[in-house]
Image (cartoon, rainbow, N blue to C red):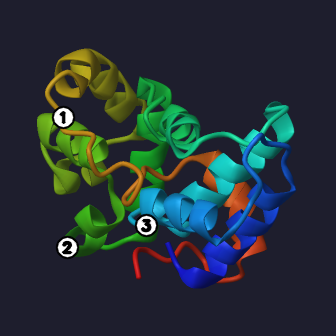
Amino acid sequence: MTGDCFSKVANILSTMPSQNPWDDKVASVYALAMTSWRDDVALLATVTALKTREFRPTPAELRNIAMSFVTNLTPMIAAHNIAEIIRKHQVRDRNNHASEPIKALVEACGGWAAMGARDTETNTRLIKEVFDNVMNTVDTSDVLSNPPDIPQLETVRGLLGNGHKALT
């Protein structure tokens, strides 16, 4: 997470009620816990906590909020994400814009070139057929630093003013 994004996150978290007053020590714990998160993921989790929690969440609670967004991948969301990546990027660049679960689904369905050559309806049907088997084998350890493109992340990118910068 960039310093600019952490400033926004810290400003929001510092206003939330908590038994522990916000100070530099508390801020450094949050910064350490969220250091590998992508900016849009960190801000989305924080804004969601602001809207849904009465008290400041712990870093672990923020992580659970973030994970709930980026791992709630359904076959339909996966199909949409894959279609968007195909539409926006050349074959050689597509893996750079896909999370590990998306890459695994694409591989199970024949690869990026095959996915790009088929119609959306066929791709969606194939994704539904392989989804459960693929998702049970995918490593999700990087989803906070390299999340799938989900609509919720789009809502906070304007607040960042920097797209969706990765780690710094």
How many angstroms separate mark 3 from mark 2 (CA)?
Answer: 29 Å
Instruction: Name the front one of labels 3 and 2.
Output: 3
Residue 110 pos. (x, y %): 12, 41
Q: Is residue 46 above or below residue 104?
A: below
Disc on the earlier residue, 3 or 2: 3
Question: Which secondary structure, mark 2?
Answer: helix
Identity, as a three-letter code, of the amino acid under mark 2 = Arg
Residue depicted at x 29% and y 65%:
94
Of label 1 and label 2, which has the lower sequence position? 2
Which residue is tagged 2?
92
Report the residue marked by disc 3.
Answer: 35
Tell me, for residue 138, which label it has, or none.
Answer: 1
Residue 128: numbered disc = none
Between residue 159 and residue 54, name the one nearer to us.
Answer: 54
In the depicted view, which residue is nearer to us: 148 or 12?
12
- Decide: few, some or many residues near mark 1? Use Cα within 10 Å; few <14, some 14-19, many ≥20: some
Q: CA separation, marks 1 and 3? A: 23 Å
Residue 34 pos. (x, y %): 47, 59
Q: Is residue 94 left or right of residue 121?
A: left
Q: Decide which of 164, 84 is in the foreground and name it.
A: 164
